[in-house]
Amino acid sequence: MAGNTFGNLFKVTTFGESHGVAIGGVLDGCPAGISLDIEAIQNDLDRRKPGQSAIVTQRKEPDTVEFYSGIFEGKTTGTPIGFAIHNTNQKSHDYSHIKDSYRPSHADYVYDQKYGFRDYRGGGRSSARETASRVVAGAIAKQFLGDMKINAFVSQVGELQLNKNYTELDFSLIESNPVRCPDQETAAKMEEYIKKIKKEGDTIGGVITCVIQNVPIGLGEPVFDKLHAELGKAMLSINAVKGFEYGSGFEGVKMKGSAHNDQFNTDGTTKTNYSGGIQGGISNGMDIYFKVAFKPVATVIQAYDTIDKEGNKVATQGKGRHDPCVVPRAVPIVEAMAALVMADYTLLNRTIKL
Amino acid sequence: MAGNTFGNLFKVTTFGESHGVAIGGVLDGCPAGISLDIEAIQNDLDRRKPGQSAIVTQRKEPDTVEFYSGIFEGKTTGTPIGFAIHNTNQKSHDYSHIKDSYRPSHADYVYDQKYGFRDYRGGGRSSARETASRVVAGAIAKQFLGDMKINAFVSQVGELQLNKNYTELDFSLIESNPVRCPDQETAAKMEEYIKKIKKEGDTIGGVITCVIQNVPIGLGEPVFDKLHAELGKAMLSINAVKGFEYGSGFEGVKMKGSAHNDQFNTDGTTKTNYSGGIQGGISNGMDIYFKVAFKPVATVIQAYDTIDKEGNKVATQGKGRHDPCVVPRAVPIVEAMAALVMADYTLLNRTIKL
Amino acid sequence: MAGNTFGNLFKVTTFGESHGVAIGGVLDGCPAGISLDIEAIQNDLDRRKPGQSAIVTQRKEPDTVEFYSGIFEGKTTGTPIGFAIHNTNQKSHDYSHIKDSYRPSHADYVYDQKYGFRDYRGGGRSSARETASRVVAGAIAKQFLGDMKINAFVSQVGELQLNKNYTELDFSLIESNPVRCPDQETAAKMEEYIKKIKKEGDTIGGVITCVIQNVPIGLGEPVFDKLHAELGKAMLSINAVKGFEYGSGFEGVKMKGSAHNDQFNTDGTTKTNYSGGIQGGISNGMDIYFKVAFKPVATVIQAYDTIDKEGNKVATQGKGRHDPCVVPRAVPIVEAMAALVMADYTLLNRTIKL
Amino acid sequence: MAGNTFGNLFKVTTFGESHGVAIGGVLDGCPAGISLDIEAIQNDLDRRKPGQSAIVTQRKEPDTVEFYSGIFEGKTTGTPIGFAIHNTNQKSHDYSHIKDSYRPSHADYVYDQKYGFRDYRGGGRSSARETASRVVAGAIAKQFLGDMKINAFVSQVGELQLNKNYTELDFSLIESNPVRCPDQETAAKMEEYIKKIKKEGDTIGGVITCVIQNVPIGLGEPVFDKLHAELGKAMLSINAVKGFEYGSGFEGVKMKGSAHNDQFNTDGTTKTNYSGGIQGGISNGMDIYFKVAFKPVATVIQAYDTIDKEGNKVATQGKGRHDPCVVPRAVPIVEAMAALVMADYTLLNRTIKL
């Protein structure tokens, strides 16, 4: 209830602060009998980890996951999978610049107001470091999902948009550049732009597009737990996300119904896919695709005024090693959350008929 | 789990199909001691009901709610509030045009695939008629919330946008026109446009903006259950919704962090509000505002080809009395879902400190 | 959370007070495609209803269930089944004897303390009338369970015990006498005893034994949600229940492990069944059996002293038409709750393997 | 859902097998601001740990808990408390005697049937080792509960009963003997008896009584989530438990209502307490007391016949270092589960009034 659990049947509970001993989680409800590829899990963690390229934060955290339970002789046992990632970058920092003052557009102020005090060593629980635990659980979900393929990629950085439909893209190129944009030309421009922003000590927002393919028909529940509603919540729960749209999205509001309707082929597939693979909250077997908007990271390496706990104005200077643009590292997080949703609904769908 | 319940502590479970005996629900967890204004509840239902103006469906349904429990001497008792709205428009229609064929971009096809069969009399459970039950529960939530004010309005119909910031608007004008747009000039244009679309037998999408004011600081949970994640899920669970954004939303991705950060005033309020009243998933006391994108309704009154259960192509003709544009009637639904989220998080917030 | 929902996947939410407009509920998660025998549901309600024999309360309530949704052409649709039982016995009673005073061993006092006030017309939500809604949901669960057979019967009234193992009994005799004890001789003694107690204006406790047969192997979860733990909670949630034991129960503590262990036959069945059909929280395919202890009903038709809201001593006189012994009418309630648990775990068990 | 989580608002999720790397858990929903006494937590673990006396298993496991998150400067932060207890006793045992055969009255057989295979190194997830994680969470719950006092003790071993009402006992004597029975004379007899049973290579059952004092009025929900129903589930979820009764329990069924009713004193307390401190599922401020029945442990150090996976009869010999009687070590587990229930309902009770 305090919101550290995601999913109902295939569900993960995470724990850990950015500057504590360890982060980690418990994945409960993962079916028995899955042959786990541990390397693939670590590989997704590596896609998320700091320091992987010149355009992300230069913090060094190996983010090595240890499994404590739920796996025996290489297979899941059906019992909860406990895991931890020890924090290696815990050295006693100087927090004096944030201990008593509130960084704008961070959670510092609301934490103090909500809980009465806060762990001032970095973002605590609101740090995006928490998402490493999601990546572990999501990587297991991917393996459970088998043929269902989930690919996320960067489709916008600031004003720079990837102006191609996802069907024109080669997903195997996503990992070929540090931006994780599968169009090399656009990726190069984005990379350059992010470097420029970084030099300014500033940050910039971006958009991630995610495509889910080979989806069975019938996943999703008709009313409150529509498939896209849960995907939306999953994405909006990722740090810095400000918007979610699927299928025709916000642009679709401008269309007429006669044009927007996806006419059937005789095999049940549709000629167009404005629905984004989901109708009435239930997957129809077409590709699911959606977009996730990320705001510019709040930590800028510039001087600014803010307030302290007593409401006094204080001059401060942003410092640290932060991401100039969060989307390249957020790609595996988007995939992980999508995988968790699809795994959960896959299990739920087994229960609906006699 | 089958997704007919929304909320954790202040939670509503709904039941009912568009062409069954009744729809209704159970609101559980509503605190004891609220003096209920039953008229205000019926008033919100009337704002949602068909036939209220020339630009909505002309079906006649009085939508009168009956309360069965949970209220005694005008006050909530803390026990579950059971309620029902009997369907009065159940006369035996001719369903032959939809019984064996699938309407495009409706849930017909996926229902048959998911459950093995479906209630072919209208949309069954996927009909937006279900949202009447949400409006009842949401209207009670509003009364629980007291001073917190939730106002939704139509900000876009097709290409027609209301080009004003919400702070420039007079919310008391929302109900002054059938579109529910608080700018009379824009509302008139929208109304005319919807009438034109209706004449064509077509439909058009739209956007609803919602503003929540007088929000206490501290509502929302830091990780999976961020306040905006739950608001997003709530909105995406409404029929025809394709997108959700809050604060700076999709436009915010183009901004630099230095410009996007909301600098503090010495009283803890912020000079700008790109955050949309939520930081790190927790309300900061500023106005919460978000946008919800609705696709054009799938039922068009035109001839088109589709397929039947055996995959044969069949020529069909849309008929019935449907909304040319769903957003005017969806305004109270958006408010209701927002109220349910805020009520749930208000209760949860009582449990977080010693 | 406020505790009006039972079950996770096959789950019922109930509403309604003893003296309100109606009681009822929503059964969510019931799989699609079950051919419902409505008469069988009403039959279970009739087994629970007041006035059915000389040894139960003489109140007259027909307890006719109306279904509002979730059933189409005689089959469940997979959507929530909403139902209500209107209260016909609502005539304006004289509540002056209980309005301001607290009946001992009733919930009157704790309700006032917990909620700040209470619905003083009878027991409100704590009335056993609520269990009629459980019987409806449980009767549907029984039909979902198919071959699994659930039989409950009265095995003790006061000091009178049925001294036979359940395997010696003919369950078809349960309904042959008003006590619902499948041994005619013991039943006759119990009936006479209850009549005597009734004449005294007093009440007496009893025990119900429940046997579940044809249980598949593998139902139940190993840790917190052990099958017997959920059965125990289900039974303890029934009004007036003070104890639950399964298999060897409290007597089993006196046995040595070497005698208590159920040795295997070569087909996986066991020679004895001290385990009560459940090992490590998981069904092993043997009969599940358990006992449920009911206290004597608190309402006695005698004069006694109690206190009013201000703590003043008041002399009062119990009146009304209450059960001298609750167990005959509680038999279908025990069966209903058992069926709900078994249905829930049957669905859950579909999700545990790859 | 897979049943590794207990509680709704104050909730613990546990992980770990008896022979894996570590066991542990995540406590979510623990309010912020509790000054934690870590030593008291370790102390409860020590009361549960093997090897503590001559009458328990002689396995050596230090059971040292490590905290990973949720605590800052000695106080809970309101974020999830992740913790682990590394298994130090993992040396590669010889499991050949159990790998392919099923121990009677253990979960071996049902695990294989349910999941398709099992972790044959000891009991895996069904080992009582899992309860160490519960003790950690429960010890934190105790500290949250403040003045509410929870004392459990051994009241029966085999046929040997402690024939005193709990009000006659001095709880400070519970820890004065290895049996954890607060009556020295009875404790001595029990100890001797357990030693005798151990020498025989056999095991014996027992009963634990638990008393909760200083309980506020109003905890518990009226219908499915009655306070005693949740306490019952909590106790029945502990390994080897076969029965639960509270207040007058199974003996109460023999009483008449006129005698069983707890008459009020003018201050709202009652003259007797057959209700066991709970009326209508809600605490009434009197002491809560209940009994928990434990079967004799299934592992006996004797020769017996059983079956292997193919259903062949195999002669085997029980070995290992197991408890001859489980109740002395189960005392802190009963207390922990009781504390978790009381903490959960304490938080829930904050949400029920306007």
Image: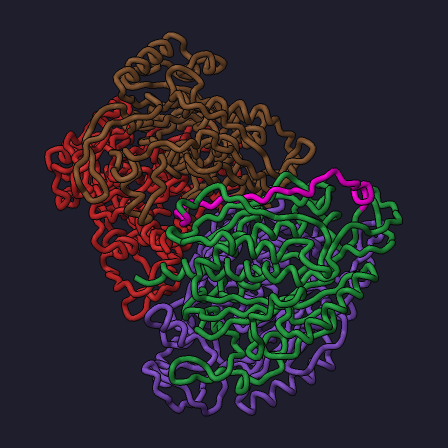
Chain colours: A red, B brown, C green, D purple
Q: Up-down: is A177 above or below D66?
A: above
Q: Nearer the viewer, residue A125 or C104?
A: C104
Give the camera-side residue of B84 and A150: B84
Q: Is residue C77 magenta?
A: yes
Q: Is residue A100 visible?
A: no
Could you tell me residue D149's position as x and y percent?
A: 68, 59
Query: Horizontal placement of A49 versus D264: left or right?
Result: left
Query: Residue A352: in sight, yes or no?
Result: yes
Q: Quadrant of the N terminus of chain D?
A: bottom left
- Farthest residue, direction top: B185
- The answer to whether residue D206 is above or below residue A84 is below
**Would residue C139 be found to the left or right of residue B233 on screen?**
right
Q: Residue at x 53, y 42 (%)?
A: B9
Image quarter of the C terminus of chain D: top right
Residue A245 place in picture, x, y as percent: 30, 33
Q: Nearer the viewer, residue D261 or D204?
A: D261
Residue drawn where x is 45% and y is 87% of the image: D318
Picture mark count? 0
Q: Position of residue D269 (x, y in %)?
A: 80, 53
| Residue B304, image x, y percentages | 20, 28
The residue shown at (32%, 58%) is A65
Residue B58, picture quadrant: top left
Name the residue rendered at 13%, 35% in the picture.
A188
Image check: B98 left or right of D284?
A: left
Tell me if residue D37 is in the magenta stretch. Answer: no
Report the span colored magenta: C74-101
